[in-house]
Image: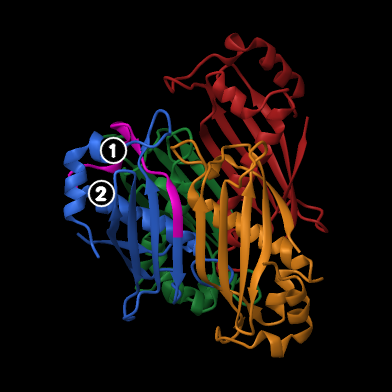
Chain colours: A orange, B blue, C green, D red
């Protein structure tokens, strides 16, 4: 239900403060989301080929620690909300030796038709996947 | 009080959906913040040399539209909260021909000592700048 | 023939060395290329809509200086080679107060069909634009 | 002598052509370099703490194929040149199912003093590491 994705911090991800730039965390969230989706037995690439896209409508990050070049981090990912129109993922970024996550976040996505870029009813169009995700929902 | 920063969307900022990747907006916010700070009569680079850093503690974005390669956008930036310990900026991303912003957001920053990376009391340390910012606060 | 594009260095473009990360220069080159192409009386977006893409086959950068956050740089861009199959752009990154460019580079691009991703003969398909570019060639 | 680093392509690394943007490969090269250096029994972070930085003076990439979101790539990295003043790394990016690398490249770096940002004689300052690298040189 909750996946764990390992990330090694890249030099290019640091900034002149000597820490990872805050805009990098959403990119890691996305890598974690990619892994989460594989649990459904398909890849996000396949989902796009099936005509579904999931553009973001909201992003939230709380930064309570920092990470640095070469850190080996774990990104935890889970689904916290699901409807016919939307899905929300939650994230925690863990750094070895620290108990609290250094960053937590969430992203809200619309289910969108890849051709028209308009909302689609995911429950109706893909009932099987909808049920699978529903069963994996986390509080 | 509210600054406007012009941005032309770069090819590298798009993704395979054909739109700007959501992680790029926080980078534009930062460019807008850089311009906002210049209103104080100093640059953010000078602020860092004076021993102050402003790492993010929160980031929020709401995406209500999309932008594409070569779009000429305007990023509006203002300060919505100020205390001795923190400052919050708000943002709106405007696309020509659209009335509603395509993205709105906010970032919360701690005032931090550049050497120790620990909180500092900005009001006490830089009363002159504190007052200047206070006078520019937006509801 | 040679265009000049202004860039203000973004915080996110720096790394923990305190200078701009080398992977950012190719992104600036691309912004400069976008401006160069406008001289033809069309945008690169329009070129893509006409069915042409120009993926890179080579990239070369020489770094002889550094740039820093908030620097206001000029990217000079010109075309140094043209054939029915390929086009090469050259670049110089200039920093105020320095005579020598801080970075020079070149990119080689194939003319590719946007649908099939296969080489196309640009001279035959778009003779008018071919001639325009030829007239702008720089030694 | 040659290290292999695994990379899974991130969504943010694609562009509107539907392939990985060319500016991402140098970032992968750097991740590969980070792994190569670990063979010396130290990390690049430690090297920086010992007062050594290795800014790029040259970058070359040849793109002969493309990569896409979720591809699982291998980045091969080796050292092709070494002197008291400089070090050159070579790279190959391999995609499963393709014999030829989709991208090859090299980076040339100066040995630089972390405080002064001026050239240092790496052979004299760190003879032990110099000999280790020399023994790992690849034709």
> Where residue D24 sits: x, y (%)?
58, 51
User: Which residue sits furthest front?
Assistant: A139
- Element marked by disc 1: helix
The residue sitting at 61% across, 42% down in the picture is A9
Query: What residue would you read off at disc 2?
Result: B37
Residue B47 image label? 1
Depth check, front residue: D113 or C111:
D113
Above or below B139: residue D51: above
Say whether residue B76 is visible. yes
The residue sitting at 34% across, 36% down in the picture is B120
Above or below D74: residue B90: below
The residue sitting at 38% across, 70% down in the picture is B71
Instruction: Say whether disc 2 or disc 1 marks the residue closer to the N-terminus.
Output: 2
Instruction: Based on the picture, tell me whether residue C9 belongs to the magenta stretch.
Output: no
Mark 1, residues whose alpha carbon is within 10 Å: few (<14), some, or many (≥20)?
some
Magenta segment: B39-59
Say whether residue D19 is visible. no
Quadrant in which the C terminus of chain D is drawn: top right
Q: Do labels 2 and 1 share a chain?
A: yes
> Where residue C53 sits: x, y (%)?
55, 69
Instruction: Based on the picture, tell me whether residue B42 belongs to the magenta stretch.
Output: yes
């Amino acid at each position: 239900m909750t996946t764990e994705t390992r990330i090694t911090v890249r030099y290019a991800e640091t900034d002149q403060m000597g820490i990872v730039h805050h805009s990098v965390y959403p990119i890691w969230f996305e890598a974690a989301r990619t892994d989460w989706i594989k649990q459904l037995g398909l890849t996000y690439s396949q989902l796009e080929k099936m005509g579904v896209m999931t553009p973001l409508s909201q992003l939230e990050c709380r930064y309570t620690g920092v990470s640095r070049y070469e850190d080996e981090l774990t990104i935890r990912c889970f689904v916290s909300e699901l409807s016919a129109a939307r899905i929300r993922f939650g994230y925690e970024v863990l750094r070895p030796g620290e108990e609290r996550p250094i960053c937590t976040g969430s992203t809200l996505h619309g289910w969108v038709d890849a051709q028209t870029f308009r909302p689609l009813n995911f429950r109706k169009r893909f009932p099987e996947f909808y049920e699978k995700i529903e069963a994996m929902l986390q509080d």
